[in-house]
């Protein structure tokens, strides 16, 4: 009998054998090599066989009652399945584990703990690198078809962001998910209404309202709040779709990535998106975070985009993370450019020491001497490099 059992599990590990073995092989493949003792018993494999296979290093036990069908380090997805099996079928992926499983780009570490949620009535002991939280109404938060069970993407994003202490990290997480087109600010706002006890929900709501206005990154949010709004600049269009070519640039100013009024790109053109554009004045502001602007190819694309804008008579200002700590100097440069292009509005000082107050023309309005559609603005206070 024991030899027959050994033959069955051996066939299961090799992928041969009868129908029960075939189903067990398929199960392990879906679970990236992980399986539970309960699943093994259901397919005719006894505890004695499992123990023997572990001794000869054909299996390894990773949690109580959970095995994998290979030896050596466990890939992240195998760890994830094993953790879920260890916590039982009522558990669900949550937190950063759910975000990674949904395919969001991020600075993931294969050694990070696996985050799981269980119904509030359950209590589990600590299990290695598994972090378990107890949720009320967990069933109502689950994705309808994901296996293993996983909370909805919006729920995972909002609850994970709420645990970040810094607003900047909350904004980066939420806005990056929208930028990757995994969800939308509107869907996140709707989900937020169902999470009445979520910590920091007012701050998160404001981040999402900024995203509705077209903000797609933390840097864009800083520009909107600390530069444009804080200093009374005119309201800009955001994420303006433009088709660039060697000799022309056409754009629509709807501020949405889905606009259909811009001519489609052809083999001799390409579509770009302007971060911020003051359309009536022909002033573009590009905000260069590290992602997407760090390599030589990206810098070349940025220069080509700026040159295309210049050939159409537009002025491009480019800022990086300096604006986070120097918003007033950034505003001073933008106001100078807008003044040159005909803006006569009245910016405001955000504080008694605001850099805008250093040049009376910026505050009172009017034009600089010899200003024109293509003239260069006078030098504003330089931002740190």
Image (cartoon, rainbow, N blue to C red):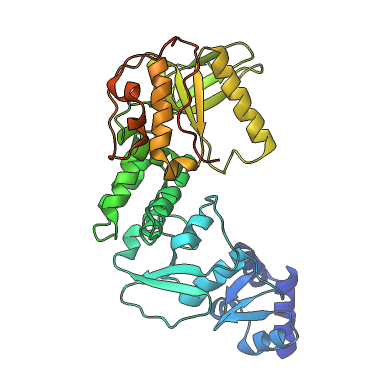
Answer above or below: position of 95 versus 299: below
Residue occupying the point 66% across, 40% down: 295
Could you say which is closer to the camera, residue 60 or residue 302?
Answer: 302
Q: Position of residue 326 (x, y in %)?
A: 42, 41
Query: With 262 as the anchor, is 354 left or right in this view?
Result: left
Position of residue 91 measured from the top left corner of the image (x, y, whole percent): 43, 70
Q: Residue furthest left?
A: 196
Q: Can residue 357 be seen in this view?
A: yes
Quadrant assignment for the N terminus: bottom right
Q: In which quarter of the image is residue 324?
A: top left
Q: Quadrant of the C terminus?
A: top right
Quarter-of-image position of residue 160: bottom left
67 versus 28 height, above or below: below
Q: Nearer the viewer, residue 134 or 180?
A: 180
Nearest the eye: 274 or 131: 274
- The answer to whether residue 370 is above or below residue 83 is above
Picture quarter containing residue 24? Answer: bottom right
> As rendered, which of 269 and 260 lies closer to the eye?
269
Q: In this view, does 157 lie above or below 83?
A: above
Picture residue at 56% right of the left edge, 72% below the top: 82
Tell me which residue sits at (73%, 84%) in the image: 6
Image side of residue 374 versus residue 298, left or right: left
The image shows a total of numbered marks equal to 0
- Residue shown at the point (51%, 77%) measured from the top left: 86
**Residue 218: x %, y % from top left:** 44, 44
Q: Position of residue 337 (x, y in %)?
A: 43, 21
Q: Is residue 278 visible?
A: no
């Amino acid at each position: 009998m024991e030899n027959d059992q050994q033959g069955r599990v051996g066939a299961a590990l090799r992928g041969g054998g009868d129908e029960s073995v075939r189903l067990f092989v398929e199960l392990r493949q879906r679970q990236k090599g992980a399986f539970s003792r309960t699943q093994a018993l259901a397919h005719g494999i006894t505890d004695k066989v499992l123990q023997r296979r572990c001794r000869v290093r054909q299996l390894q036990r990773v949690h109580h009652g959970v095995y994998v069908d290979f030896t050596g380090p466990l890939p992240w997805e195998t760890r994830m399945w094993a953790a879920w099996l260890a916590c039982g079928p009522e558990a669900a992926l949550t937190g950063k584990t759910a975000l990674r499983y949904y395919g969001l780009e991020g600075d993931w570490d294969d050694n990070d703990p696996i985050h799981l949620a269980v119904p509030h009535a359950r209590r589990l002991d600590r299990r290695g690198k598994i972090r378990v939280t107890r949720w009320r109404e967990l069933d109502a938060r689950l994705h309808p078809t994901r296996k293993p069970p996983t909370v909805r993407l919006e729920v995972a994003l909002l609850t994970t962001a709420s645990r970040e202490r810094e607003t900047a990290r909350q904004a980066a997480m939420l806005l990056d998910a929208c930028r990757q087109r995994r969800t939308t600010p509107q869907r996140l706002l709707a989900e937020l209404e169902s999470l009445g006890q979520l910590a920091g929900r007012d701050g998160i709501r404001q981040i999402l309202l900024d995203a509705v206005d077209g903000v797609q990154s933390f840097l864009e949010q800083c520009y909107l709040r600390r530069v444009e709004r804080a200093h009374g600049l005119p309201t800009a269009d955001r994420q303006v779709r433009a088709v660039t070519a060697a000799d022309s640039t056409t754009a629509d100013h709807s501020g949405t990535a889905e606009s259909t009024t811009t001519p489609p790109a052809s083999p001799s053109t390409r579509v770009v998106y302007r971060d911020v554009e003051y359309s009536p004045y022909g002033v573009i502001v590009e905000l260069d975070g590290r992602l997407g602007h760090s390599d030589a190819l990206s810098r070349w694309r940025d220069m080509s985009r700026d040159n295309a804008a210049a050939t159409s008579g537009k002025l491009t200002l480019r800022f990086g993370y300096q604006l986070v700590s120097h918003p007033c100097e950034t505003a001073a440069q933008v106001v100078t450019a807008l003044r040159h292009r005909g803006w006569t509005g009245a910016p405001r000082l955000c504080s008694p020491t605001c850099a805008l107050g250093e040049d009376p023309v910026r505050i009172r309005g009017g034009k600089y001497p010899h200003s024109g559609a293509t003239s260069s603005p006078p030098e504003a206070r330089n931002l740190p490099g």
